[in-house]
Amino acid sequence: NKQPQDQFSNRGMTLEKDIDETNRYYLNRGRCVVHKKPTPVQIVKVDYPKRSAAVIKEAYFKQASTTDYNGLYKGKYLDFEAKETRNKGSFPLSNFHAHQIEHMEHVVKHEGICFVIIRFQAYNESYMFPAVKLFPYWHRQFKDGRKSIPYDVIKSEGAIIPSGYPALVDYLSVIDQLFF
Amino acid sequence: NKQPQDQFSNRGMTLEKDIDETNRYYLNRGRCVVHKKPTPVQIVKVDYPKRSAAVIKEAYFKQASTTDYNGLYKGKYLDFEAKETRNKGSFPLSNFHAHQIEHMEHVVKHEGICFVIIRFQAYNESYMFPAVKLFPYWHRQFKDGRKSIPYDVIKSEGAIIPSGYPALVDYLSVIDQLFF
Ligand SMILES: [Mg+2]
Ligand SMILES: [Mg+2]
């Protein structure tokens, strides 16, 4: 019975799909240029059949060394990761890889706009949580700190992202308030 | 006899490898944060063997809708495409897809720093050619214009990129002159 896992993976894609649709809308309206990065894949074997497209016959998923999304808004560099959780009380830091955090630290250092979009599925709420507020939680976990960020902290130190149509995850409206 | 084609594909990768190495060096030195985007792949079939990593069994190359590289330099958004040619007198516009040009137009409109790195293999020279100078050539080709950019134009309106070690394609030095 694979139902629960399938449900989970579908849910796991919902936020990204909503953001992708939002980004298409933003692009068409000339608001920003933000794209999802392709899934990194290590290609091992490719067939070249006559008169048809090359077929990848063996490949493996590679761990992403950066974040899901980046792009350009009002001349500024934007960079963010999208994550959702079924948890109700907190967001588990195990959702991040060390490489992603390192990348976000580089972005902040070079004055990019960097954040995480965290969706709590239980409440159907998405928050913009600035990367600079994530870093202390990330590093503290290795010295006896807790392994998650409390929901209340995300609610109070992040900003709830309005959801509309077609801007399903209207993150630019929040960026305007916090970064410009 | 596949020699010439193999040679060509190896050569075709050289510039990207040189840029990747340059970007690693830049990142380590804290100069900028620029990464190559993964090759976009349409995944059709994945096997999940017990106790080992998921294997992609069927996938296809998708046309990239953006450029090869983007990132962040001094708070600014950087976006560029890398292309090399064996031609000696000009750079063929057929090296670009309409989608890439469209993407570069968006980037310029939103005030990103956008350019092409063009390598002439015959001279072992790499040029930074600003996207704004590429656009007129691109659009002119559809109204009886020529289908390539003359080498002399790239030489005079672009900027030659110094090659050192470990910055094999030291494009930042040229960006500093032209965009800051
Ligand atoms: Mg994600
Ligand atoms: Mg290229």
Image (cartoon, coloured by chain):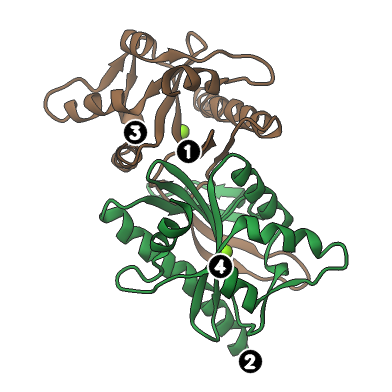
Chain colours: A green, B brown
Name the residue rendered at 29%, 23% in the picture.
Answer: B133
Q: Is residue A5 above or below residue B160?
A: below
Front-most of residues A51 and A75: A75
The answer to whether A146 appears left or right of A132 in the picture is: right
In the rendered image, residue B70, in percent from the top left (x then y), is placed at 49, 39
Q: Nearer the viewer, mark 1 or mark 4?
A: 4
In the rendered image, residue A166, in percent from the top left (x then y), is placed at 30, 70
Name the residue rendered at 43%, 69% in the picture.
Answer: A17
Tell me whether circle 2 and circle 3 mark residues in contact (CB < 8 Å): no
User: Which residue in the protein does label 2 denote?
Assistant: A1
Tell me whether circle 2 and circle 4 mark residues in contact (CB < 8 Å): no
Q: Are marks 1 and 4 on the same chain?
A: no
**Mark 2: few, some, or many residues within 10 Å (few <14, many ≥20)?**
few
Q: Nearer the viewer, mark 1 or mark 3?
A: 1
User: Which residue in the protein does label 1 denote?
Assistant: B68
For the N terminus of chain A, which image quadrant?
bottom right
**Mark 3: few, some, or many residues within 10 Å (few <14, many ≥20)?**
few
Which secondary structure, mark 4?
A: loop
Counting residues from the start of the chain, the first of labels 1 and 3 encountered is 1
| Chain under disc 3 | B
| Chain under disc 2 | A
| Chain under disc 4 | A
**Mark 1: few, some, or many residues within 10 Å (few <14, many ≥20)?**
some
Which secondary structure, mark 2?
A: loop
**Mark 4: few, some, or many residues within 10 Å (few <14, many ≥20)?**
many
User: Which residue in the protein does label 3 denote?
Assistant: B96
How much space separates mark 1 and mark 4, taking CA atoms? 33 Å
Identify the amino acid type marked 3: Phe
Residue A61 visible at all: no
Q: Is mark 1 within 8 Å of ligand 2?
A: yes
